[in-house]
Amino acid sequence: MIAARRSGVRQRETIPCASAAGRLAKGPAAGLGAANAIARESLADGAKLNELVEALADARGLVRHRAANALKKMQREDPVVLEPFTKQILDAAAKEQDLRARWNLVEVLGHLPLKGRNRALALELLFEAMRDESAILRANAMQSLADQAILDPKLLPRMLPIVRAALEDPGAAMRARARRLLRSLQRLPSQR
């Protein structure tokens, strides 16, 4: 922020950083910084969306977390907006070590329109996340796998035992999500 004098009154004017990564790096680590604003801007501007996807490769975990969060929010607004970036998102998800970024990326994977090798890689990453010690990551991965199973009922025979086993998970988040998913999956036409 810089202070400017106009008509004898001090006003604060925001000068954004040049890059999405620079903007995402600012602010307290506990918050999302500019992630929400960047998500809104990127929905309207392809160049900003490119920058946001590039931020997934930033050296700072905080930036990658906030970038993944912004992408997740964008995808909720426009489910196909990230389709051209499938490969970059899959690459980022495969390499990501920051837990908060992984929470968001596994949610994004569940809603990407995937085919062929990309789909196989995404499913592998999601099944791998199901073995993580983080209950939140496991719950998000289970949700994403269920979302993919809804799109492709061939996954249901593999998915239903996982959801049923999650009913006994020590994590309350997993048990609650499993109950909700089991009801949804059992209502599918292929399960009647």
Image: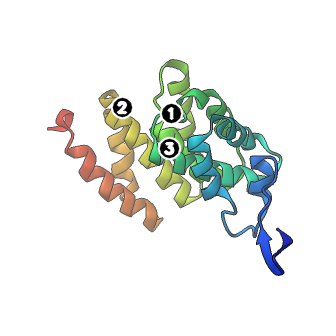
Question: Do labels 1 and 3 touch, CB within 8 Å?
Answer: no
- Residue under the image location 60 percent in, 58 percent down: 36
The residue where tag 3 is placed is: 75
Nearer-the-camera pick, 11 or 33 = 11
- Sort mark 1 into few (<14), some (14-19) or many (20+) by Cα contacts within 10 Å: many
Circle 1 or circle 3, nearest the eye: 3
Q: CA–CA distance between discs 2 and 3?
A: 23 Å
The residue where tag 2 is placed is: 155
Nearer-the-camera pick, 63 or 10 = 10
Where residue 96 sits, quadrant-wise, is top right
Q: Secondary structure at mark 3?
A: helix
- Picture coordinates of residue 55, whole percent (x, y): 74, 43
The residue most toward the top is 116
The residue most toward the left is 192
Q: CA–CA distance between discs 1 and 3?
A: 18 Å
* Kind of residue indicated by mark 1: Leu
- Residue under the image location 76 percent in, 40 percent down: 57
* Kind of residue indicated by mark 3: Gln
Image position of 135 (left or right of 146): right
* Kind of residue indicated by mark 2: Leu
- Sort mark 2 into few (<14), some (14-19) or many (20+) by Cα contacts within 10 Å: some
The residue where tag 1 is placed is: 123
Residue 12 in view in this figure: yes
Image position of 74 (left or right of 188): right
- Picture coordinates of residue 62, whole percent (x, y): 75, 57
